[in-house]
Image: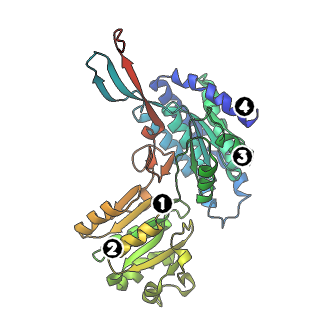
Amino acid sequence: MNTNELIIKAGEATAALSALSDTEINALLTDTAAALRTHYADILMANRLDLERMEPSNPKYDRLLLTEERIGAIAADMEHVATLPSPLGITYSSTERPNGMTIRKVSVPFGVIGIIYEARPNVTADVFALCFKSCNVCLLKGGSDAECTNRKIVEIIHSVLKAKGIDTAVCTLLPADREATACLLGAVGKVDLIIPRGSSALINYVRDNARVPVIETGAGICHTYFDALGDLTKGTAIVENAKTRRVSVCNALDCLVMHRSRLADLPALCAPLAEKNVIIYADQEAYTALYGHYPAHLLQEATEEHFGTEFLDYKMSIRTVDSIDQALRHIAQYSSRHSECIVSEDEAAIRRFQRTVDAACVYANVSTAFTDGAQFGFGAEIGISTQKLHARGPMALPELTTYKYIIEGDGQVRK
């Protein structure tokens, strides 16, 4: 089938989902998680074929890479989704009008959701789990970088769906070519929502070309502000974790904003980064503070291009400020509204930072690495929205629903 036919068939599968009980849905997700664990070797074999086509130095390589441990984590997230309450049929409000009719606002699925993503095969399983749990059909448009891995994961999902007698079109993997992307973006009346996940270039392309509603999951240009009253021990752990836990993810630290009064602590704050070979692009004051205390081959003077950059690599910039006001201005100028952090023991500074910073997730003395649907207790995520319409931050089951009004009466007519 061509892409348009696949999209049409996926739309027809919404009826199959609406007929399932929550018990049946949970059982299938549990069985699928078990199947992923059982067939982990097959997934790793497919993943190796994808990895062979990518240079290990590519920032996407770590995102593409699967291990038995990572597959186990994907399966565990799917099992967690199965334990969560259904987001459907929730009554948000109920009123009775003077004429006796009742009006209820009730949560319902979107219907057909298209996901366009790059070299992140875990997204394939996460999206299926969340969409299936919320009775949405998912159209998966992965990139060519992860084509073999995505196909193997969907093959395993389909085997479980077939065993349960469920239309496999509820989880449809589209071709990895550009033509499929164009077809999906123009599927007016066939697709209810598109969510792009990937680089800013991908997200901008989808936003600019889609004729179907889009929720942006923007790039993560993340800052940590080390305040005048920041705790050095906490700050050192937070900066290292946010920067080096996984450099290729959107919640990784890109810029350390340093209060001038604490520059003497900067070498200690950055010491763990040197062990991980993190390249630092420091402004003049930070460069001076680090010179002779940080490996020379890893220390460079910052230029304007190093601020507002999502590195997705072992790289980080440092900006020196003389006040929280200046820190807030810097973050406002360069932030992608994803995840921002303050390290401080000053309660007033923390509260001001939380009130002022315009981001989906605002942290105080906690690593930005926690911006993740599973870490938030959502089981998994379909993306991290940086916009303000409908959803913001990690999107999970509640964000995959819309609502409709149910009106009941006893023969009332309007005069």
Q: How many numbered callouts?
A: 4
Q: Which SS class for mark 2? A: helix
Residue at (29% x, 70% y) in the render:
344
Front one among 225 and 133: 225
Residue at (65% x, 47% y) in the render:
142
Mark 1 or mark 2: which comes first in sequence? 1
Is 89 on the left-hand or right-hand side of 184? left
Q: Which quadrant is the N terminus positioned in?
A: top right
Report, in whole angstroms, how far the alpha carbon at label 3 lies from the one at label 4: 15 Å
Name the mark nearer the viewer: 3 or 4. Answer: 4
Mark 4 or mark 2: which comes first in sequence? 4
Q: How many neighbours does mark 1 have within 10 angstroms: few (below 14), some (14-19), or many (20 or more)?
A: many
Q: Which residue is mark 4?
A: 5
Front one among 228 and 415: 415
Q: Which residue is mark 3?
A: 176
Report, in whole angstroms, how far the alpha carbon at label 1 lies from the one at label 2: 24 Å
- Residue 257 lies, in percent from the top left, at 41, 74
Mark 4 or mark 1: which comes first in sequence? 4
Name the mark nearer the viewer: 3 or 2. Answer: 2
Q: How many neighbours does mark 3 have within 10 angstroms: few (below 14), some (14-19), or many (20 or more)?
A: some
Q: Which residue is mark 1?
A: 251
Q: Which quadrant is the C terminus positioned in?
A: top left
Report, in whole angstroms, how far the alpha carbon at label 4 lies from the one at label 1: 37 Å
Q: What's under tag 1, amino acid-wise?
A: Asn
Labelled pair 1, 2 in contact (Cβ < 8 Å):
no
Name the mark nearer the viewer: 1 or 2. Answer: 2
Q: What's under tag 2, amino acid-wise?
A: Asp
